[in-house]
Image (cartoon, grey):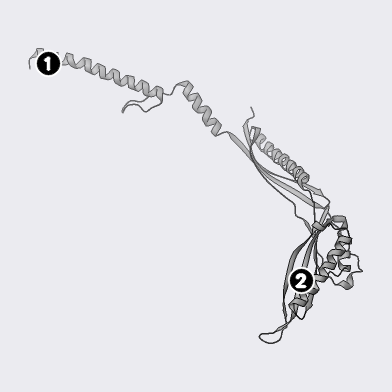
Amino acid sequence: MSPEGGLLQRIRRRPLAAALAAAALALAVLAAIAGLPGLPGVTPHSQPAALAAATGSSAGGAGAATVSASGSGSVQATPDWATLQVGVRTRAASAQAAAEANAGAVQKLIQALRQAGVDAKEIRTSEYSLGPVYGTGGPSPAPSGYEAVHTLSVGVPADRAGAVLDAATQAGANQAGGVVFDVRDRTSLERQATNLAIDDARGRAEAAAQQAGLRLTGIRSLQLASGGVPIPFGVRAVEAASAAVPVPVQPGQLTVTATVDVVFDAVPAH
């Protein structure tokens, strides 16, 4: 190739190389602005300040500090309601005779309860059974008779429990499953216990946040559990012969409790 030809080719290549270099530089700048990866071998510049600030704000919101704490609260109250279990057990030679004798005795018991001031809607059957009674002799003993048991669940004011038990035994009740004391309306007590539990959790969380250099700003989530165990008062099965013995019943105190698990939002204190 002549010297003139070689020089002409070099002149033609220079504009093409310059154009390619300019295009690569432009693509690198666009990639840096858009946050996209650059061309192979080209390192993009950092993101613009506005885009970086927005990303940082979003990440801060997702990873905001939280403080978790549990709390408990309790309120005591005197039970105002009692549920009694009273009934009649009868035996006879046949199932029909046992059932009829039991029905008559239970009807008499219900009438006595009504005369003692028990509301009819507070008397309901909680258990009824009728079946054979077997002896102990031989590999396959024959029934020695039949037994019927009818138990009533009776709701009364707590201060009437003893008197109603007396009336039941005097009317022929020979079965007593016990007395359970409770508070008939728990709503206000449960609310009081819940408020105390939340205050307890907040106090614990504030103490922890202070040690960590944080300040609580609000509640993110809260889980609540409440309860209070009714007070059972055991009464053994009684016989009609003991009807003249008064039944001393003391309801005592009932504790209604609430527990909470709370997650608080927090920010640096300074």
Q: Residue drawn 22% across and 17% down?
A: 16
Quadrant placement of the N terminus: top left
**Image location of residue 191, percent across then percent down:** 75, 43
Q: Residues within 10 Å of mark 2 (few under 14, many from 20)?
A: many
* SS of the residue under disc 2: strand
* Mark carried by residue 180: none
The residue labelled by disc 2 is 149
Of 168 and 14, the residue lying toward us: 168
The amino acid type of the residue labelled 1 equals Gly
Of helix, strand and loop, which one carries label 1?
Answer: helix
Residue 133, by quadrant, is: bottom right
What number is the disc on residue 6? 1
Residue 242 pos. (x, y %): 89, 71
Q: Are there few (<14), some (14-19), or many (20+) residues within 10 Å of tag 1?
A: few
Instruction: Find residue 234 and report its horizontal and vertical position in percent.
Output: 80, 64
**Residue kind at label 2, given as amino acid type:** Val
Q: Quadrant of the C terminus?
A: top right
In this rendering, which labeled residue sits more in front, label 1 or label 2? 2
Residue drawn 29% across the image and 19% down it? 23
**Residue 101 makes an appearance in the image:** yes
In the orientation shown, which residue stands out farthest toward the right? 244
Of the pair 184 and 23, the residue shown nearer to us: 184
